[in-house]
Amino acid sequence: MKKTFFTLVLLAGLSGAAQAQRNYYESPVFAGLKAGGSISTLQGTAVRNSKDIYGFHLGALLSIGLSRHFSVQPELLYSQKGGKLIAYSGQEATRRFHYIDVPVAVHGRIGSVFAELGPQLSVLVTANETTSDASTSISDNYNLLDIGYVAGFGYQPKTGFGVGLRYNGPFISSAKAVEISSGNGKTQLNIRHSVVQLYVNYLFKNRR
């Protein structure tokens, strides 16, 4: 009788532990918001004396748990990028780009501390070059789509507030190919975005 009783208690305990473990993984998706500031510049052989400019980014995200230590985080962000450089007129000019960014980062975590890495697709909304004399649209000189990557680290509990530091790097040039003066065809200008972002997250609790 005692053996039967202890066997039932042991099975109940194992069942409870298995249920708790299952519950940890069966509700792995959390929606959230994020916003923060950015420092960006322009890089490449077609850029002269680029300086940093400040901007911001904001949007929404999903945190999708894969296991206790890994998750995937797709995001939809409005993001400002650009840099300050010497324009063809010789004046100092600020080029500011407005993008819709779609990063998909894989998070590896220990507790609430994480590191992240993944690709990013960016869609150009508009771009302007501003000097002391005027502001001019330069959207037609740049590609609609930009491809890059994100890498960073931060602190994020399962729900609630978190903070992070992220770098946006380029895979391709953002500028379109241009006709060269000799008439021998087009040449690809090498202009790339480089952005550092400091942000705050908030992940909402699941209502179950």
Image (cartoon, rainbow, N blue to C red):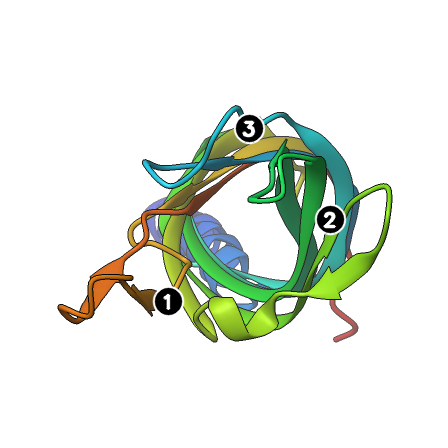
**Residue closest to the far front:** 182
Indicate the position of residue 193 as horizontal and vertical percent values.
48, 44
Q: Which residue is mark 2?
A: 159
Neighbour tally class for label 2: few under 14, some 14-19, many 20 plus, Cα within 10 Å = some
Indicate the position of residue 96 as horizontal and vertical percent values.
69, 51
Image disc number at residue 176: 1
For the residues labelled 2 and 1, the Cα–Cα distance comes to: 42 Å
Q: Secondary structure at mark 2?
A: loop
* Sooner in the amino-acid sequence: mark 1 or mark 3: 3
* Sooner in the amino-acid sequence: mark 2 or mark 3: 3
Disc 3 residue type (three-letter):
Ser
Indicate the position of residue 13 as horizontal and vertical percent values.
47, 49
| Residue nearest the viewer, comparing 173 with 19 | 173
| Residue nearest the viewer, comparing 44 with 147 | 44
Residue at (32% x, 47% y) in the render: 190
**Is 101 left, or right, of 146 in this rendering?**
right
Choose top left, top right, bottom left or bottom right for residue 78: bottom right
* Sooner in the amino-acid sequence: mark 2 or mark 1: 2
Q: Which residue is mark 3?
A: 50
Of the two numbered discs 2 and 3 in the rendering, the one whose residue sits closer to the viewer = 3
